[in-house]
Image (tube, coloured by chain):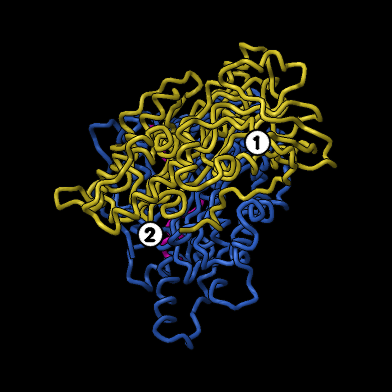
Chain colours: A blue, B yellow
Amino acid sequence: MLEDKSQELTPISKLGEFGLIKHLTENFPIVQSSTKLSIGDDAAVIDAENQKVVVSTDMLAEGIHFNLGYVPLKHLGYKAVVVNLSDIAAMNATPTQILVSVAVSNRFPVEALEEIYSGIALACNRYKVDLVGGDTTSSNAGLVISVTAIGLADDAKLVKRSGAKPNDLLVVTGDLGGAYLGLQILEREHSVYLANPNMQPEMEGYDYILERQLKPEARTDIKKKLEELDVIPTSMIDISDGLASEVLHLSDQSKVGFNIYEEKIPMDETSISTADELNLNPAMAALNGGEDYELLFTVSPSDFDKIKNHPDFTIIGHATEAAQGNFLIARGSNQLIPLTAQGWDAFLNKD
Amino acid sequence: MLEDKSQELTPISKLGEFGLIKHLTENFPIVQSSTKLSIGDDAAVIDAENQKVVVSTDMLAEGIHFNLGYVPLKHLGYKAVVVNLSDIAAMNATPTQILVSVAVSNRFPVEALEEIYSGIALACNRYKVDLVGGDTTSSNAGLVISVTAIGLADDAKLVKRSGAKPNDLLVVTGDLGGAYLGLQILEREHSVYLANPNMQPEMEGYDYILERQLKPEARTDIKKKLEELDVIPTSMIDISDGLASEVLHLSDQSKVGFNIYEEKIPMDETSISTADELNLNPAMAALNGGEDYELLFTVSPSDFDKIKNHPDFTIIGHATEAAQGNFLIARGSNQLIPLTAQGWDAFLNKD
């Protein structure tokens, strides 16, 4: 990691707070017409252009959400942005601006912050969002990144967690479980490295799941795809804490139950083979693993034909009356297993 | 402090992440008509109601921005909100919503977070803003609070830092230096306490400046007062880092110079007497102390009559051509002292 290197690095105190912010943010272009005023004033100014404003915030803390032993700082900056854009996408809105605050201890040189901001810049460029504000401060402790994402959407197209009705189809984008399995490989190889720093990590063949963990993408493309299909989901959420946890959120807020089919849960081949290798149940990685940042949504049964053969979408179950509860229907057996949230919890899953 | 107490306190892990957020935020009412969807979905939804959206974020870190040895957690929650509302007020906008993220180590019980959130609730109630989102996470280290504030304003009334013209009058609200001097008293008494925990702190007579430090207020009242006077400032900023630093920001962004008169800088009697007691120059406390959260703005010379006798406003100087630079004109002597920013810097002023 950068902070372990040498005397040539620049201490943050050399630039000071204002100099640092200016230095880190000077190469961020403004690409959104809704951004009327950006970094450099007391606040940014956004023109909602007759749309609704959607806003979400997430905080990532060192040692809890990431381990700098194997997470490159650039990837960390990228991921901190993406997880917030995913929340905006889950409202069926288009992300337009972000604000980023970073607390770092003085053990980090300016070059480490430059790495984080290069990842933030990459995400801004990839998703066409403007960095319009933030704060950079010292911390007595580890690294903490807080991102607030802002998006815009027509009122009629906004999708909440609360609109699912019994018999609606439950649909997921992409594939699940990969991010969790990628983390298992990273942690395994990091343990090997700690035991013997001369050992080369064995990362070959795991590219897909490592990328799912280290460089996740937000499904901001789904809004347009749904528009092309003329489908407005009845409810939607992004998968940050595992499929089971998110299904239970939709259930809770929409006042419905869900049946989901284990055999329908989409998983990549690398995920399945890695789960086998690690003696894990692949479906459990999808249900409880989290961090896949795919979208989970419900659509009216009348939209079945529009959704069924689309390469981005997999129908994995359906909504039932609330009184029926939430179940996983096990592969082959038709056994109903009650769904419980064993997803990721920042206060429980500490290393 | 709460975290030092006993076994009766509730560990955060008992509630878990979702339970904790729900528990902490359940008593926050929605009072703004612009809040269309609040906590509980992937993002909040705000209706800008044909106004511009103003957004700002600030992060406070334990040991850098506050010392839990003498800052009560409830005050900390209150202040974390207020400093962000002050940024919105500095745009001549009305704050409407906030999002709050908190990272805490497991040494904090649920009751400590309840204290922080009771302060946040007090600020929300006082300023009529809605808490619409946030994140609560574990941290390996100290306490970090990140607040994002959102406000609304008519486009024509927004005030940036960049509009001052030569000969504009420089105006400040309230009085300055108190927050810094309050901090000096708190630090003095905390040192005494650390040396001898049986000593009673001597806080009597310092109430005004202690309140300025521990429970600052944002000047969200100024927007209405300016409207009543039919004055729109040509530039504005809030005083978070000391008068000198803020004058230099206006200078830099408006491309003007400023002359300010030491004898005009408004200070409370308690601030002056405390500065004397501590052998500090009172004007230096105002210029370099920071955290007063008053507003500093410029108005056209033609607005002089509207501003001059208003109890909330003090004219402390005027703008000049940029080439003339920025000066403090010393009391009595007419000596010109170049203004330099020695204000508060999170990367330099570490204890």
Judging from the image, what secondary structure is the residue with disc 1 in? helix
Q: Position of residue B286 (x, y in %)?
A: 57, 39
Q: CA distance from mark 1 to mark 2?
A: 43 Å
Viewer-side residue, A97 vs B233: B233
> Callout 1: residue from which chain?
B
Which of marks 2 and 1 precedes in the sequence? 2
* Residue lying farthest to the front in this orientation: B332
Residue where numbered disc 1 is placed:
B262
Query: Which residue is the site of mark 2?
Result: B141
| The C terminus of chain B lies in quadrant | bottom left
Q: Nearer the viewer, residue A90 or A7?
A: A7
Taking the image as shown, residue A210 lies to the left or right of residue B245, namely left
Locate residue B79 relative to residue A215 in the image: left or right.
left
Q: Local crowd at mark 2 within 10 Å, few (<14), some, or many (≥20)?
A: many
Q: Residue A24, image x and y in percent?
A: 66, 55
Specify whether B61 is left or right of A123: left
Q: Chain of mark 2?
A: B
Q: Nearer the viewer, residue B203 or B168?
A: B203
Q: Are marks 1 and 2 in contact (CB under 8 Å)?
A: no
The residue shown at (64%, 12%) is B229
Q: Residue furthest left?
A: B8
Which corner quadrant of the image does residue A263 belong to? bottom left
A191 versus B216 height, above or below = below
Per the image, is B130 magenta?
no
The range drawn in magenta is: A168-182
Q: Is residue A175 magenta?
A: yes
Residue A180 at x, y percent in the picture: 41, 61
The kind of residue on which mark 2 rests is Ala
Residue located 50% across and 36% down the image = B272
Does any portion of residue A220 appear in the rendered image?
Answer: no
Question: Which amino acid is tagged 1?
Answer: Glu
